[in-house]
Image (cartoon, rainbow, N blue to C red):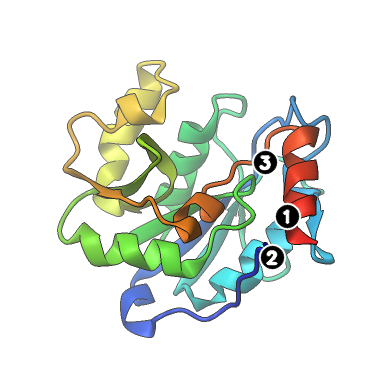
Amino acid sequence: MCWTAEGGGRRDLWEGTAAGFLAGGGSGRMGRPKALLTLGGETFLQRQARLFACADERLLSSNDPCIALPGVPAVPDKDPGLGPLAGLCALLERCRSARLAVVPCDLPCMEPAIVERLLEAMGGADFCGAVVGGRRQPLGAVYSRRALPALQRALERGGRRLTAALDGLQTRWLPMDDEAARRAFFNVNTPEDLKRLEEEWM
């Protein structure tokens, strides 16, 4: 099977929606920055920036000046080392759009079409995320800017788990058990994951 995706996106759904790329993690299990791993001749981060050019706004959560995207503002964590919740809060604080689609760099097969399904289901909720294979996915999800105060409070209390930080928000979870969703949420954390991805890609 060849894992492919093309840019594009439905203009009506992406109006007022930003894409935020999470690339601030330590990549400890991979041993090198996941954002700079390559797939199909481009880095994971370049691939995501290309695919999500449909967004009204694009932002990059990065604490490393070597991890950058031309024309995409880099947003460092206020307190580096506190995990994806800190990166999410920094992106929402910087974001001008009403909604933020959060795309972590270790989901290189995430596509706009998956996020569009979440946008269609979100309605007036503060958050909409996928449930894939029975597992809730708080990343590769859509957050309203209204969620920021509650997420900041969770971070200030020392919270690290995104699913716990969602308590008190109006959330919607959308079951996605098709092939496209399983592909989009394939997480590349280790060299073994990368090898599997390369084998599937080729």
According to the picture, the residue beneath numbered tag 3 turns out to be 188
User: Which amino acid type is marked by label 1?
Assistant: Glu
**Label 3 vs label 2, nearer the camera:** 2
- Whole-angstrom CA distance, mark 3 to mark 2, is 16 Å
96 or 2: nearer the eye?
2
- Quarter-of-image position of residue 152: top left
Rate crowding at label 3 as few (under 14), some (14 to 19) or many (20 or more) other CA atoms within 10 Å.
Answer: many
Q: Residue 66: x, y in percent?
A: 82, 49
Secondary structure state at the residue bearing disc 1: helix
Task: Say which amino acid is labelled 2.
Answer: Cys
Query: Horizontally, is 20 left or right of 149 in the view?
Result: right
Rendering coords of residue 112 (x, y %): 48, 68
Q: What residue is rendered at 27% in x and 38% in y?
A: 149
Quadrant position of the N terminus in the picture: bottom right
* Quadrant (top left/top right/bottom left/bottom right) for the C terminus: bottom right
Q: Please give left or right for residue 68 compared with residue 87 in the image.
A: right
User: Compared with residue 33, is residue 44 higher up or lower down, i.e. above or below?
Assistant: below
Q: x and y percent of residue 140 in the render? A: 46, 50
Q: Specify whether residue 5 is in view.
A: yes
Q: Are marks 3 and 2 in contact (CB under 8 Å)?
A: no
Q: Which corner quadrant of the image does residue 170 belong to? A: top left
* 90 versus 59 height, above or below: above
The answer to whether the residues at label 2 and label 1 have Cβ atoms under 8 Å apart is yes
Give the amino acid type for the residue marked by disc 3 in the picture.
Val
Farthest-out residue, front: 1
Query: Considering only vertical position in the picture, is 86 above or below 176?
Result: above
Q: Report the residue marked by disc 1.
A: 200
| Residue 168 lies in quadrant | top left
Q: Which residue is mark 2?
A: 2
The answer to whether residue 67 is seen in the rendering is no
State which tag comes first along the sequence, 2 or 1.
Answer: 2
